[in-house]
Amino acid sequence: MKKLFYILAAACVVSMSMTSCSDLLEEDNFGNPSVEDMMGDPDGAVMVIGQAYADLKWIHDHWGYWGVNTLTSDEAACPPRNEGTDWDDGGYWASINVHTWDSFGKAFLNIWDTTIAGAVRCNQILHTMPNYKESIGANYDAFVGELEVLRSYYFYLLFDCFGRIPYVESFDKEYTDPLMDVADVWSHLVACLERNAPNMKAVSGSDRASYYGRVTQGFAYGLLSRLYLNAESYAEDGQEAKFAEKVFSDAEDGQEAKFAEKVFSDKYFIRSEAEREGENDKRQLVPARWLKNEGNFYTCCVECCDAVIGAASYRIEDSYFDNFAINNEESEENIFVTVDDGNDTFDHRGWGDMSSKFRLLAMTLHYNHQQTWGLVEKPWCGFSARPTFMELYKSDKSGENADVRGPGNELFTNKTIIRTVTDTTHVKANNKEWIVYTYEESAEPKLGVETQLCIDTIYRTENGKQVIDKLIYESVEIAEGTPAGTESKQRWGWFVGPVLDKEGRLTSYAEKNPEYDKDEAEKLGDKYMVPEAIAVNTIITTGMRDIKNDASYNDGARMWKYEIEKTGKNRWADNDFVIMRYAEILWNKEEALKRGGAGASSVGTPDFQTLMARSFEHTNNGNADVNTRVAKFKEAYRDPATWSDKDFLDERGREFFWELLRRRDLIRFDEYKNVEFVEDKGSYRNWFPIPYAVIERSLRDPKTGKPIWTQNPGYTDPWADK
């Protein structure tokens, strides 16, 4: 059922041959329904509106928003592995890991282009909608609100990265102004969401499927809660008060409160930018909710969270992992997702290096996980957690119950295990390939590479020279205390431990041989018998040998909270990517209260109790009641009523890792500069640089000839001295 809206919208995109925003809704009809036909029917109008969601599919790609927001935070990294033979890309990933990126990073340009493409698509459909108002009928206002909220999210993604952006709410006017200031963008986003949220659909059980994968009232208020909670984090260091004053730009010094009383009006909620055009009335951009609350961002956040809570549209799932199941459309906690299909040929689009497919599981798992679970796509062995992030997960006082969202506490029990060589790369010595055979007890010899666990080497003479004939191995002894890995009986949030093949044998993969000496090899020639590569047993660890140049293939815990399809059906993940969950609303509210917002805590509610309890139980199968499991949570992390700022930040990391929230959370708590391995700790890196190509194609000032769009402070601006 989850796929219905997605399939219809995707089919509409294909049938209408939409290749750019400029030809949207203007394609020739080759036997397919015309736009007029579709807009004349509510279901057809939904299909047209569904096209506006197409550019969201770039959000979870590592060359897009997910990549720069996740891999620059403490929850993840993309270390170049095996002396940079894998995941180097000209040093790009290393620069992301240690915060030394520049304006030429192609992910920044991808984000700029794809989010603006999505916003423009929304604006174009909105521009066309009035032509069909009568035929659309009673659903017209709801459809307009849906498109405006979706457009706000596209601009939010752009704003969250760059701050200063070309925000525009119309389609028929070219944007010719300098980039809009941060405070003004924030005000526009809040204004649009406040205007639309009250009139959006609050989903219920009967219509949940119809609105699955679409923005709703819950999402609109949820996004508002983010904007209010993070408002001060958008200001420069020490300039939070000036950020607030900026929104009151028409007020005289010291008269902000009186100005708020003067402009507060119900009309604020319904006036659009188009209606304001030509009036030069900046006051209409001041958020009325904020004025009512006397400029308290956090009370505004609490109110928006309460709007979601009060609608009773969502609930906390008993199992954390239900939100990330292959069929996670059944989750009543997920507020907004991208609806993904793992079929490689259906609705598969590309944008440069990006793909519309949900590929994160393939990006994080080790190459040899393919042998374990029969995966169609061989994983890429890329992204992993930074070592210190694993320290956030604790156990209860007994030590027997571990947080299920972490790497777990299951241990490998089969102390002795047969090792198999699984990489088919030949040994390379002195620039020659050597065919090497291995024996595993009485098994037939098979192709492999030399291992550190070889107990005997048999040579033969060939053309007067000794060459390796056979390598003989002993069984592998797994160290006591090694995590269970693929032998885990439960799924945990992170994968750590041995990777066994389907027959239960330990896999290995070829890596550089630390004993190999290139200079000696060149000096001794054929007499040098130390191979360049050795087979390293695949045992994933939480450590990181080198985050810039030479991580091992085994370094770093791998994300495991999304369910892995082991049927060999699809190349990519069929799970829907989670953009917003009800759990975020509950934690946003509690943090806002701690920061001075007015309101009553929700910690004592059943949903919040479940949120804590499930962290220490995979499923509630009667094994422990809620109070017992909540007690385990408090033993590990203490009662949230006593939490410090760091406690809130740590819990948000445990709960929402790889869900697009961590970077902004770290900035809000002033910890982004302290991420492990970071080299440049400048606060200017709280914003990413405006892409070089964007400034290059900007309009020019007729007097100076320089681009009217300028670089963010702190980054090199090639045009500044011209």
Image (cartoon, rainbow, N blue to C red):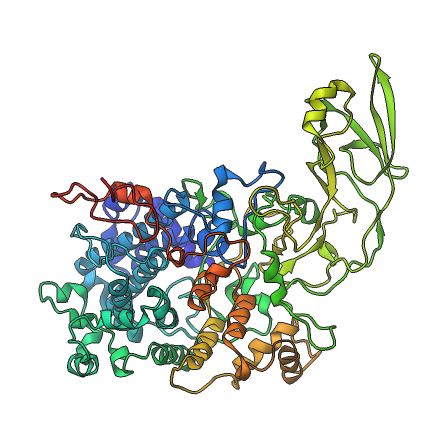
Residue closer to the observer: 638 or 339 = 638
Is residue 409 found left or right of 356 in the rendered image? right
- Can you say whether 266 is above or below 434 in the image? below
Is residue 530 found left or right of 229 in the rendered image? right
Residue closer to the observer: 90 or 9 = 90
> For residue 600, which quarter of the picture?
bottom left
- Can you say whether 138 is above or below 256 in the image? above
Question: Which quarter shows the C terminus?
Answer: top left
> For residue 562, which quarter of the picture?
bottom right
- Can you say whether 223 is above or below 65 in the image? below
> Residue 606, image x and y in percent?
54, 83
Residue 17: tell me if it is visible: no
> Residue 526, image x and y in percent?
76, 19
* Residue found at the far top of this picture: 463
Look at 40% across and 73% down and name the residue there: 203
* Residue found at the far front of this picture: 721
Residue closer to the observer: 346 or 425 = 425
Is residue 302 found left or right of 382 in the rendered image? left
- Can you say whether 694 is above or below 284 in the image? above
> Residue 525, image x and y in percent?
73, 19
> Residue 119, image x and y in percent?
29, 55
